[in-house]
Structure formats: C-alpha cells, structure tokens
Amino acid sequence: MTVSIRTLSRMALVAAGLALSAPAMAATATIDCGTGTPSWNSSTSTLSCGAGGAKCTISGPSSVVVNTQFTLNASCPSGTNYNWTGSGAASCSGASCDVTEGTTGNKTYAVSTETAGSLSNNFVVNITSGAVAPSGCSLSASPTSGPSGTNVTLTANCTSGTSPIAISWGGASGTGGCPTSFTIGTPATCAISNVTANSTWQASFSNGGGSAGNNPRSASFTVQSGGGGNFAGCPSGTLTIDGQWGQTAIDTAQFGEFGGNIMSIHVQPPANFTGTTTRTSSWGEYAGPPTVREAVFSNVPCDFSNTNALKTSLGVVQRSVDAIGFAFKYRAGSSSTSAVGLVAGQSYYINVRNYYSTGQPSCTGDCRMRGGLPQ
C-alpha cells in the first residue's frame, strides 16, 4: 500500500492537533477606566471599571435663578445611553441635559451609562429666588444741624439690589409716615417736621435676598443755637433764637437778619447748672461795620424795661445802651455784686435791638452778631 507524501503530511498535522478549518475569532471588549483598572466578569460577560475606577463627571452652573433654563454636561469613560436623575433632569438621555427648575433650593443631579462603574458623584445646583440682596445702602439727613424747630429731610438709598427694597425705620421719632419701600434708582425721601432735639434715625434694608450687611444705617441731626416760632409778646419780624446752652460761637446770621428790628435769645440753664462760678455772655458785631445797639438781660422776651431786667445783688440792671458790643455776667443761684443769679430750668432772654437811645435805627442792612452762652 502506497501512501502519498501529501497524505502523510495531513496525518502529521492532525497528530499535532491543528485544525485545518478556518481559524476561530476571539471575543473582544474595551472600556476607558481613566486611572482605574478594568476587570472582566465571566459570569455576566461584562467588563467594568470596578469601585475604584473612573466615574462620570458633571459640569454646570453652581447657582441659577428659578424658572431659568441651564445646561448640565456629562463626561463618562464609556457608554452611549445616559441615565440622568434629579427632578428637572429625569427626561434627559444624552451627554448634555437642559434643565429648568420651578422651585428654589439645592437640587441634586447624577448620571450613569449602561457601562457598569460609570455612575457619577452628586452635582448640586442652588436654585435661588432671583432677588439680589441690597448693597451700597445709605441714610442721610438734610440739614444735619440747625436751630430747634427745623424740618429735616431723610433720604434712604441703595445702589444695587432687586427692587422693591423694603425699609424698616427705627431710632428717633417722626418716621411714622415715611415710605416703607423704594425702587433702585429712585431713593426714598421723608420729611421730619419740627425737630426740637438732637436726633438719630435708623433704616434697615431688605428684600427676598436678605441684607444683613446693610443693617442698620443711621443719620443724625444736631440742634444748634437757633430759633423758630415766635416768643410771646414779641412784635412781628423779631428774630427769635433758642440759645443752645454751652455754645460759645452763636452766629445770629444763621437764623436771619434783624435790620431795624429786634432779636431775642432764649436762655435756659440746664439742671446741672450749679456752683458759684461766674460766666460771661459776650456779644459783638460779626462780619460787618461797628454798630451801636441796645441790649437787656430780662425775664421777658422782647422787653427792654428795667422792671423785668435781671439785676445784681446791688440792684444794677443788666442793660447796655448805645454800645457796639455788650457782655452780661451770670452765675447759678443768687445774684452777686457783679453777676445776676440764674435758676436751672427757668427761661431768661437776652433782648437786642438796632436803635440808638434817641430812637433812630443803627442798622438796616447786614445786621448780625456773634456771641455765646458758656456753661
């Protein structure tokens, strides 16, 4: 029996265990695990990144106004079908997800793909009310000082924030009728009538965004020596001044001129006016030519009689006639030989008129004086 060389070659190949049919194709799978290590699950025939492998990451805004659309973007190591979770993202299926939230608060989102191990960490977006907290807020008073009885205008303002801005008033009285809100760009103003004492007002500003950094703001008004209103018995045109006790530089022109007329300065010692020290209230022409005047320190406003004039213990009337300037001495309690005695809390008046003793006016134009009431 003859065996051909070809047949012998075939038998040798079979003996070697090599198949003569088409070669078998091995199964393949790929996954991008970033810095992680991929692993094969033979029971489920799946390749995964495992617990330590790469996950999806989400990018997007950290804060958004309610009812405003925003976009979340997912970056995953593998997969094509994106499974989003989170109230406004549940219907998304791609790598990019457009979201609109209808309520405020912190909203949490996550995403995964069909590839095991690609679930993302939570991504949080703060959904705000849209109100921006007021900033650059201020409160001012105009004027900031003046005589008793002055009308003061308060102005409240903020340079930015979401309108309307609410105002909460506090501090001194008089703000009961003031506006309680205003719009950015249109400051709120409020007139406080007849301010008779040193006053400080306060304003706190707020809206839906809160405003702790702007609260409160304050504005003040200081009562100067100065008048307002008529003193009983004074003729029309009298310049009346409430003299602020302890002030040593009272300029009468702050309250008006008294050319050809009378000026009456109210003097009221405070409760702490005690002791036997003698003080001097001196007055003279200010920023004008020397002018002669008549002056009386009296118990009655606008009175120039000796009857109501204050007197020393020797009976000397506190009166100056046809003088360019004058000075009256006083002390607490009883009068001395050179000074009149003043009682704390009682009203007295320094009355001045621009006349010679013969009756003709000594000043009809720029008539002003400066003096003081030392404590």
Image (cartoon, rainbow, N blue to C red):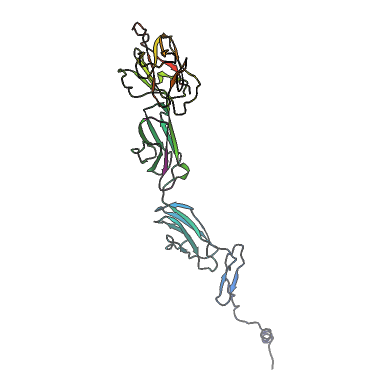
Looking at the image, is 276 positioned above or below residue 137?
above
Please say whether residue 203 is one of the residues in the magenta stretch. Answer: yes
Q: Residue 318 location in percent, x, y? A: 42, 14
Q: Is residue 286 visible?
A: no
132 relative position to 120: left or right: left
Looking at the image, is 179 positioned above or below residue 59?
above
Q: Residue 250 location in percent, x, y? A: 44, 20
Q: Quadrant of residue 231?
A: top left
Q: Residue 51 location in percent, x, y? A: 58, 67
Residue at image coords 49%, 62%: 110
Between 255 and 162, the one lying in front of the other is: 255
Between 293 and 271, the one lying in front of the other is: 271
Between 367 and 68, the one lying in front of the other is: 367
Q: Is residue 148 visible?
A: yes
Looking at the image, is 302 positioned above or below residue 91?
above
Residue at image coords 38%, 27%: 148
Residue lying furthest front? 314
Please say whether residue 42 is one of the residues in the magenta stretch. Answer: no
What segment is highlighted magenta in the picture? 195-210
